[in-house]
Amino acid sequence: MPIVLRSLMRDRILHLLLLLGVILLPLAHYRWSELPAAVDWHTIMTLTGLLMLTKGLENSGYFDVLGARLAQRFQHERTLALFMVCAAALLSTFLTNDVALFILVPLTLTLRKFSRLPISRLIIFEALAVNAGSLLTPVGNPQNILLWSHGTLSVPGFIAQMAPLAAVLMLTLMALTWWSFPARAIETHAQSGAQQWHKPLFLVSVLLYVVFIVALELQLTGWALLLVAGCFLLMARSVLVSIDWSLLLVFVAMFIDVFLLMHLPVLQPWFAAITQLGEGGLYLLAIGLSQIISNVPATILLLQKVPPSDVLAWAVNIGGFGLLPGSLANLIALRMAQDAKVWWRFHLFSLPMLAWSMLCGWLLLRWLH
């Protein structure tokens, strides 16, 4: 438990969110009984399960084996980066952006054991890739699930609506990846014998991963989480101790802060005026709100005022780029990177990506309309 307490004490993002909540509490109009419902507990349970399962795979040592194979398979930084970015985008289209990161980021981190690679930059691009790839399908990310469930489009219809934006952003990201990673040979470290890994823990983690994903689709997340926690409690208690518990508290604090922000009396006239906005105003508002409160809460708020149009769908997905809060996937990826400098380096790529996406997205919308 001291490990968990040290993590909580050092988490500056959590401290900032708690301070913001304390400031907003006396200013917002709400009832204390409403605060627990402000948290999306399904999301919290999902993240908890994914954190446990990823840590189980990591502790099994199999990521070391796979990382060593990747380091041997790819000869140049550029080709490895292009492969990882494509894998992140592809996985995010059907496994959701969060799950894709939970699979790929730990694998990416193991690459530093076998080679000299710009690991933090690679993780930044994986975060950008899941934002670009996940927007294509209705199950790629939470905001798309919300938009699709509130609309009338079929799955193929939704994909057709998002395909032009997805194509432009993926082409842009591939070009940016090509430019940002040189074609120089990967410098590998000397390896001492075959990589050791714990096969039973790996197999159980993979099996539980499949069960958990199926349970998410069947709306049985709570039971699946109990199963995962119980198995690791019996088999590998170190998994439960070593996951990033403070990340879960960060998400809880974010949900409560967003709830309080939405209930500030000074902002209510602005929320009421949303229904009067034209397409351009809605486009800018959705992107701007996403930068402040993240694109999922922004989608929830805006769907109360406007229908789930293509303008809204494109805007909240574009809003995942830019500032760190734009997408919760950004926070997950950078937390897992375990690099203090990655937080500001992320914006060197994400902010230009936001500006370019906004421009291309609006021009495409004007052309399609």
Image: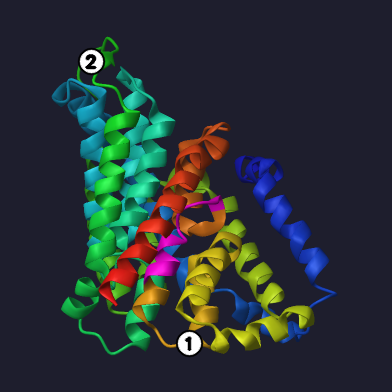
**Residue 211 in sight:** no
Q: Which residues are magenta?
A: 314-324
* Quadrant of image for the C terminus: bottom left
- Secondary structure category for the residue under label 2: loop
Q: Name the residue located 82 percent from the left edge and 65 percent from the top edge.
A: 23
Crowd around label 2: few <14 · some 14–19 · many ≥20 (10 Å): few
- Residue 77 lies, with reference to residue 324, above or below; the image says above
- Residue 280 lies, with reference to residue 277, above or below; the image says above
**In the image, residue 178 lies at what x, y percent?**
26, 32
Q: Name the residue located 54 percent from the left edge and 83 percent from the top edge.
A: 277
Q: Name the residue located 28 percent from the left edge and 70 percent from the top edge.
A: 367
- Residue 139 lies, with reference to residue 129, above or below; the image says below
Mark 2: amino acid: Ala
Crowd around label 1: few <14 · some 14–19 · many ≥20 (10 Å): some
Task: Please give the residue where the numbered disc 2 appears in the rendered image.
Answer: 185
Q: Quadrant of residue 55?
A: top left
